[in-house]
Image: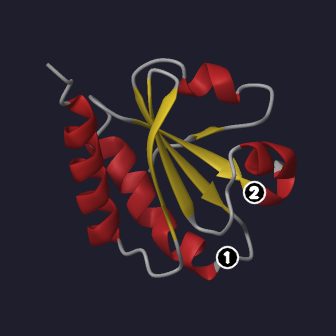
């Protein structure tokens, strides 16, 4: 399995500045977060050509989570070139629903107004 980059308040802006980046906001006491971890690792490898995935541990980055307005875990924030283009959160996220949301959000944000 790959080792995903860990986001902190010091490196967050740099990590999301270029390309498409999925930020996995998680906590060690969050059962849905822990259950999704193996899938996130596999997804990082499978989508490495067009998506970077970074982990943000909520308890160690409380202020950053407040700045990002993360209200619950797990939370997934999708950035393109430093701008948030979507978010998904809640304990009922499945690997399939995460993949579908990611595909839909990425495709919708790729369509530029004429």
- The foreground one among 15 and 109 is 109
Q: Secondary structure at mark 2?
A: helix
Q: Quadrant of the C terminus?
A: top left
- The foreground one among 114 and 46 is 114
> Where does residue 7 sit, x and y in percent of width and height?
68, 37
Q: Is residue 45 left or right of residue 11?
A: left
Q: Secondary structure at mark 1?
A: loop
Give me the residue at 58% from left, 72% from top: 34
The residues bearing labels 2 and 1 have C-alpha atoms spaced at a distance of 10 Å
Give me the residue at 67% from left, 48% from top: 56
Q: Is residue 45 left or right of residue 61?
A: left
The image quarter containing residue 45 is: top left
> Where does residue 19 sit, x and y in percent of width and height?
39, 22
The image quarter containing residue 54 is: top right
Nearest to N terminus: mark 2 or mark 1: 1
- The foreground one among 104 and 8 is 104
Q: Residues within 10 Å of mark 2 (few under 14, many from 20)?
A: many
Q: Residues within 10 Å of mark 1 (few under 14, many from 20)?
A: few
Position of 20 relative to 96 (above/below): above
> Where does residue 47 sit, x and y in percent of width and height?
28, 40
Give me the residue at 63% from left, 69% from top: 73
Which residue is labeled 2 in the image?
58
Q: Is residue 3 left or right of residue 107?
A: right
Which residue is labeled 1 in the image?
30
Give me the residue at 22% from left, 49% from top: 103
Q: Is residue 110 left or right of residue 28?
A: left
Q: For the image shown, how many numbered marks are present on the structure?
A: 2
Label placed on residue 15: none
- The residue sitting at the front extreme is 114
The reply to whether dot 2 and dot 1 touch (C-beta < 8 Å) is yes
């Amino acid at each position: 399995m790959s080792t995903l980059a860990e986001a902190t308040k010091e490196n967050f802006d740099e990590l999301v500045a270029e390309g498409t980046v999925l930020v996995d906001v998680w906590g060690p006491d969050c059962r849905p977060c822990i259950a999704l971890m193996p899938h996130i690792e596999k997804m990082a490898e499978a989508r490495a050509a067009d998506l970077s995935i970074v982990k943000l541990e909520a308890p160690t980055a409380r202020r950053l989570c407040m700045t990002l307005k993360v209200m619950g875990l797990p939370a997934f924030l999708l950035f393109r070139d430093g701008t948030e283009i979507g978010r998904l959160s809640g304990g009922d996220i499945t690997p399939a629903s995460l993949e579908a949301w990611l595909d839909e959000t990425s495709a919708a944000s790729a369509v530029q107004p004429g």
